[in-house]
Amino acid sequence: MTATLLLSLLIKSSFVAGAGLACARFLAQRAVDRVDILRGTVCLLLALPVIMNVLPAMDLALLPPASPDLPPGISPAWTSETKATGLSWPPSVQLIGGLWLLGVVAVAGRLQLGLLTLHRWTREGRPVTCAQWTAPLEDLSPADRPRLVSSDRIDSPLSWGVAPGFIVIDSGSLAERHAAPAILAHELAHLRRHDWIFLVLSRLALALFWFNPLVWRLHAVLADRSEEAADAAALETVDRTLYARTLVRLAAHPAPLAAPFAAPLMAAPRAATAMAADARTLKTRIACIMTDTSARRRPLTVALTIAALAVVATPLAALGLSRQNAVAAPAPPAPPVFLMAPAAPPATAAPMVQAVEAAPPAPPAAPAAPMEAYWHSDFRVATPAGREIAAEARARAAEARAEAAESRRRADESRIQADEAQRHAEDSRVQADIARMAAEDAHARASQAGVEGERARIAGERARQEAARHMIKARVEMAHGAEQMRKGARDMRAEAIRLRDPAYRARQIADNRARGNEVTDAELRALAGHMPSQADDMDRQADRLAVESRKKT
């Protein structure tokens, strides 16, 4: 791994990741389409090293030429300092390769540790036997039915694994049985869409290109859009209000394991797809859930976008960066040679002329050896004033560095305060959303209570009308009974008068004897004496019934 190769990978992965993020943001409207584009981008990133090794390389001379060797006799200050400290630039291949491999091992090792921890938690989990939790899984075939377990190690429901996969429920959610349809619909959507597999592939791409911030952003956006796509799939079978209320409840108790830089032993849920939303994505997911205007899917647009990314990324992967060829610098001009004859006594002018004429001509300068480049240095002896000026300049530079460090410290403090304020604002928004959902829930319950009260009022009105009808019928029956009682009283008085006749009594005695009853004449005379008083009692009862039948309630 050289600096040139690392720079080439940075440029190529930045182009692929940035193009994928832009296409998913501006060319797709549904979360499902955005997830498909981001998945294709992740696959292209993983295929990038393979394409670079398979296709013939095409070099582009974009890097500056390497520093040539210095001419003999010139030793700049930076060369001596570099030799003294033992450092060299650019860094060695071993140093760059070691740093890159260290990042790969850190990211991939964290993923592997999370998978092992998640597998252990699932193996130690308890099977869920509650009917309300297992009922939504009964309609699935045995081959598509995931294993449903509960664990005390997690704080929100999650799913992982290859189909049929695993669904792990926390103990808090397991107690709320009314939320079972919403939670299972969300996790089953993750398993059907194979979100866990693509998130693991995204983690592998992140391990290869850990030095690129755009790849980190691509992984985070893919995780968020996968949750939104699972929400949209779950809403096809679950009520929106119930689903949103369940999501808000899960977000009100965020899991500390979801922190992006958590300890390795607490990194297991990062290897799974958890339903709980954080403050950063809760508002967006709630808005998408409560909005009933979903755009039409555009599979052709998604396919053409991924194909276009592949067409552009393939030749881009074959391009390689190389250094420019150094241009040979012209040879420096030869210094002029001045030859002077030795001084002679000024006897006459002729010897001087002869000496000058006798001086041989200067030989031509030898051509300088060709060099790829040369260094030019101008050495001057430092004067005390110059040393004082240099010392003052160094003091000012030190002050400037101290002021810059102080400015950076203040900027870091301001940034920390801004992050804290943003976190408090996010928490406030979450609390406001929870309060709004609670208010909507209370309003819905009040509306339901109003409906139930109206139903009770209608039932009471019907009961009152039914009672009135029964009362009218009773009054009619009471009046009819009064008439029947008066008629019976009249019949009793007539019968008492007839019983006073001895011949009638004799006939009654004979008729009763014929029916097997023994009646004496004295009994009939006594009955004739009591019957008028009984008739009077019946009249009085008939009058009371008549009065009751005429009363108004």
Image (cartoon, helix red, strand yellow):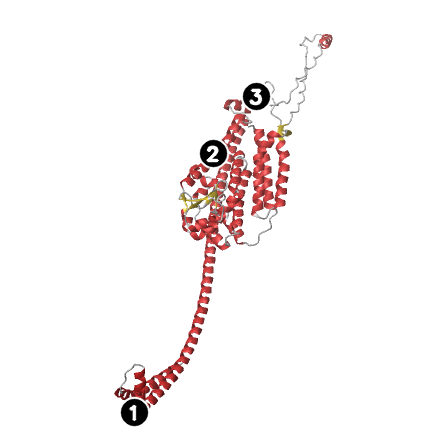
| Marks 3 and 2 close (CB-CB < 8 Å) | no
The answer to whether one can see residue 135 in this image is: yes
- The residue at 51%/22% (across/down) is 84
User: Alpha-carbon neighbours of circle 1 within 10 Å: few (<14), some, or many (≥20)?
Assistant: few
Dot 3 or dot 2, earlier in sequence: 3
Q: Which amino acid does label 1 sit on?
A: Pro
Q: What residue type is labelled 2?
A: Gly
Judging depth in this view, the residue of 43 and 366 nearest the camera is: 43
Picture disc at residue 383: none
Instruction: Measure the alpha-carbon separation of dots 3 and 1.
Output: 169 Å
Rendered view: 453 above or below 324:
below
Rendered view: 491 above or below 322:
below
Quadrant holding the N terminus: top right
- Mark 1 or mark 2, whichever is nearer to me: 1
- The residue at 62%/36% (across/down) is 313
The image quadrant that residue 40 belongs to is: top right
The residue indicated by pointer 2 is 109
- Mark 3 or mark 2, whichever is nearer to me: 2
Picture disc at residue 502: 1
Measuring from the top left, give residue 483's x and y in whole percent: 39, 84
Furthest-left residue in view? Answer: 522
The residue indicated by pointer 3 is 75
